[in-house]
Image (tube, grey):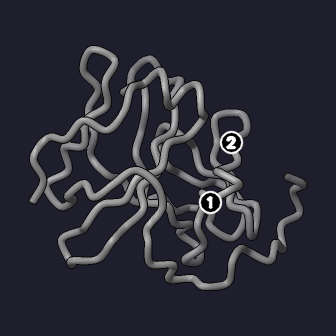
Amino acid sequence: MSDRHRLTSVETVEAEGTWLFTVRDNYDEDTEVLLVPCGDPDREAVEAWVNRCTHEAQKLYREGVGAVLRGGEVICPKHGSSFDTCSGYCDNGEAAETTLVSVETEVEDGQVYLTDEDARFLYEGPSLSDDDGDGGPSSTSHISL
C-alpha cells in the first residue's frame, strides 16, 4: 500500500525523544505510530511501533504529554509495563512476554523513511479520531512518572 515516504530525521527523533505520525493501515483504519531512538549498534538508529500497549488499547504516546522513555524502554502510562525501544519486547508487568506491533521503516543518510507495505503515511502527529475518548489513562502503575 505504501511507497517509500520520508518521515523525519534521526536527529529530530533523538532530540525530541519520540516522533508520532499517523498512517492508514491495510484495514482502512487510521493508526498512530511512534518513532523512538534505538541505541543498539546492530539495529536501525530508530524503530517504529504502533502507539498501543499490548496489554490494553492504551496509548503509549499521549498528546501534550508524549511518551515516557527510561533506560532504553517505553513505559506504558497505565500499568507501568516497559517495552524495549529496539525490540519492542516487554519482560514485566501486565504486558510481560509480549512485543509491540512494528511498522517497517528504514534509515538512509540520517533520514527516516516509512517502507511498510501495509501502511500509507497520512500526517505527522496523532490521529484525528480519538478512539479511546477518555482524555488519558487512569494509572494503576506502581511506577512514578
Q: Position of residue 58 (x, y in %)?
A: 60, 72
To which residue does mark 2 refer?
A: 69
Q: Is residue 55 left or right of residue 87?
A: right
User: Does 108 sit above or below residue 120?
Assistant: above
Q: Where is residue 111, by image quadrant?
A: top left
Q: Is residue 135 left or right of residue 54?
A: right
The disc labelled 1 sits on which kind of residue?
A: Glu
Instruction: Describe residue 41's horizontal placement relative to residue 118 as left or right.
Output: right
Residue 114 relative to residue 50: left or right: left
Residue 89 or residue 127, whichever sits in front: 127
Q: Secondary structure at mark 2?
A: strand
Residue at (52% x, 51% y) in the render: 89
Characterize the local packing of mark 1: few (<14), some (14-19) or many (20 or more) Cα atoms within 10 angstroms.
few
Three-letter amino acid code of the residue under disc 2: Leu
Which residue is at 57% across, 43% downward? 84
In percent of width and height, residue 26 lies at 18, 71
* Residue at image mark 1: 63
